[in-house]
Image (cartoon, grey):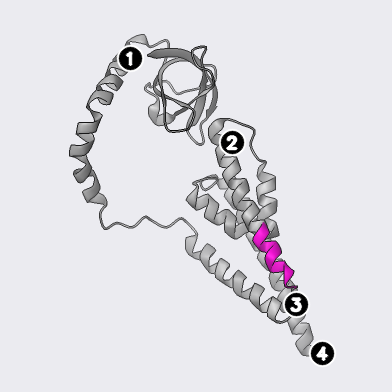
Amino acid sequence: MTKQGSIIRWDATRAFGFIRSADCAGDVFFHLRDYRSSTPPREGLAVVFEDIHVGGKGPRAMAVRPASDPHGAAQDTRSLDSRRTHRPAQARRAAPASRSPRQGKAPSPAPGASLAYGLMAGWAVLLAWGVWMQRLPLWSLAALASVNVLTLWMYAADKNAARAGRWRIPESNLHLLSLLGGWPAAWLAQQNMRHKSSKTEFRAVYWLTIVLHCGALAWLVLAKTGAALLF
């Protein structure tokens, strides 16, 4: 059934937003690919849409169009009903063809992946060396492991908050965790959760936290080791 509402939030960077409608109990999520108009979405825009429920997640809007374009909305609704009716058979026929071009192709690595994994390996070696030479206390390994677990949790919580339209975790908190040694977990979270991985400003500060943390660790371990060798 076609419903009416208005866009209360639109994030152009991540290409998603939320619609508030009197016909729905909560705000309805929609993505740019579900939007059907040449007029760009914006906050306050009155729209018509079809809502669906996927798994245990909240409602999602499909075939979203400005309310001022009723002809296009009706046409898109008929198209949506047609896709719902014929999708299973078409999907079975199209599945082999859609998979064949992708066979044998590995996903492209993220920008900076080689550098990040190289730094992780060097970081682990430096930590092991520092503990072995008694330049770092043994409990520092447990502390760093805890920081990385907390970092993963914070990224997952922020990702869920972004999807649900709730209050977000400040980026400064995520950067602080990276600076304290949680940057390996932050890298894995960015790539696997696809969160904060394309925001240029965030990524620049993130790499700065890596440089500062690794530089401080190298000075702490190597400078003390060099001083011990001299004396």
Q: Secondary structure at mark 1?
A: helix
Q: Secondary structure at mark 3?
A: loop
On-image quarter of the C terminus: bottom right
Location of residue 110 with respect to 125 vertically, above or below: above
| Residue highlighted by disc 2 | 161
For label 4, the crowd category at 10 Å Cα-Cα, with few meaning under 14, some 14 to 19 and many 20 or more, is few
Q: Which mark is residue 105?
A: none
Q: Amino acid at mark 3?
A: Arg
Disc 1, disc 4: CB below 8 Å?
no
Residue carrying label 1: 72
Camera-side mark, 3 or 4 = 3
Note whether 73 is above or below 145 in the view shown: above
Residue 160 x/y as whole percent: 56, 38
Secondary element at tag 4 = loop
The magenta segment is 137-146
Q: Amino acid at mark 2?
A: Ala
Task: Give the residue at x 66% y 51%.
Answer: 175
Residue under the point 20% across and 45% down = 96
Foreground tag (2 vs 4): 2
Residue linked to disc 4: 231
Counting other residues with Cα less than 10 Å from the Cα at mark 2, is it few (<14), some (14-19), or many (20 or more)?
some
**Residue that mark 3 sits on:** 135
Q: For marks 3 and 1, give the one nearer the viewer.
A: 3
Residue plotted at (42% across, 31% down): 54
User: CA separation, marks 3 and 1?
Assistant: 69 Å
Of the two numbered discs 3 and 4 on the same chain, state the one appearing first in sequence: 3
